[in-house]
Amino acid sequence: MEEKGKIFVGPAGWSYPDWKDTVFSGTRGKVDALEFMSTYFDTIEINSTFYRVFPEGTVRAWTKRVRNDGSFLFTVKLYRGFTHDPSILTNSDRSLMVKVLEILQETGLLGAALAQFPYRFHNTKENRKYLVNLRATLPSEIPLFVEFRHRSWLHRAVEAFMRELGIGFCNIDQPQVSFSLPLTSIVTIPLGYLRCHGRNTETWFGEKSSRDSRYFYRYRREELSEIAKTALAIASRTERTFVVFNNHFKGNEVFDAMDFSEMLNTKRKHWPSWWKAISESLRKE
């Protein structure tokens, strides 16, 4: 039986091209990346659904490649049409996204759905109304978290509004640039969520910033300790909490999740032998 307040730690995604020489450097032959990564972590955030909505067959195949004993749960990022560009969202996209979540829910593998909004999504009457409609779009039994990036959402009235809607507040650790939302430990539903994006302030909003450069960051141990205190504060008020590292470039998110799991004593088993050496080399870069 799962203990109350359990913290699920894991990476955002399970395979990137730039992980070949780091995360997967010690593997031999063809490796099932999802099966491999889910062996070591209790959660994986599915990020690919942000870029496209997958068919039922693909999602069911995912469910067969991970353990299903209650110790592993996916979290799922909503398609970008829900959060970044509603003009591209079709009725088919909406139906398929709901189907993805329902399949994972039915198989006992869904931790939560995540709607990650961009920095430009400010706390306005129109945007609050949009959240009301978004919550109504998804089945009520699907746990929904919303991630804000802008500080205007940091308000007691927002917390009360989200509690009333039954939407979870996704806490984040991100570079503190302009009016970025700071690290918080807000809880608005019986579940908790904390996403760690790194603290690369130099490339967060730069003109030449790319997805890789924005998320190329390795947390220092004292920073992980700070985040651990926040995660524990969230977990003390929830049934379960998801802590996801999204500083993916070169596999830093995997190694930070590994160190974080050890810090909280939540690791499942011995890590791959080559991870420790590569982890330390990346920390020095």
Image: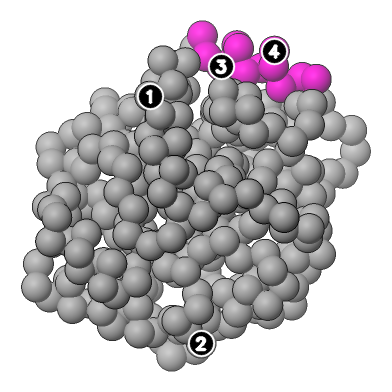
**N-term mark: 4 or 2:** 2
Q: Is residue 1 found left or right of 282 in the rendered image?
A: right
In terms of image quadrants, where is residue 69?
A: bottom right
Secondary structure of the residue carrying tag 2 is helix
In terms of image quadrants, where is residue 220?
A: top left
Task: Tell me, yes or no, if residue 208 can be seen here.
Answer: no
**N-term mark: 1 or 3:** 1
Q: Are marks 4 and 3 in contact (CB under 8 Å)?
A: no
Between the C-alphas of marks 1 and 3, the distance is 20 Å
The amino acid type, in three-letter code, at marker 1 is: Glu
In the image, 267 versus 252, the foreground residue is 267
The amino acid type, in three-letter code, at marker 4 is: Ala
In terms of image quadrants, where is residue 79?
A: bottom left
The amino acid type, in three-letter code, at marker 2 is: Ser
| In the image, farthest residue toward the left | 125
**N-term mark: 4 or 3:** 4
Secondary structure of the residue carrying tag 3 is helix
- Residue under label 1, please give it: 226
Between the C-alphas of marks 1 and 4, the distance is 24 Å
Secondary structure of the residue carrying tag 1 is helix
Q: The N terminus lies in which quarter of the figure?
A: bottom right
Whether residue 277 is situated above or below residue 175 in the rendered picture: above
Q: Are marks 1 and 2 in contact (CB under 8 Å)?
A: no
- Residue under label 3, please give it: 282
Q: Is residue 274 found left or right of 47 in the rendered image?
A: right
- Residue under label 2, please give it: 95
| In the image, farthest residue toward the bottom | 91
> x and y percent of residue 211 in the render?
41, 42
The secondary structure that most of the magenta stretch takes on is helix
Structural crowding at the residue carrying mark 4, measured as other residues with C-alpha within 10 Å and reported as few (<14), some (14–19) or many (≥20) = few
Residue 277 numbered mark, or none: 4
**N-term mark: 1 or 2:** 2
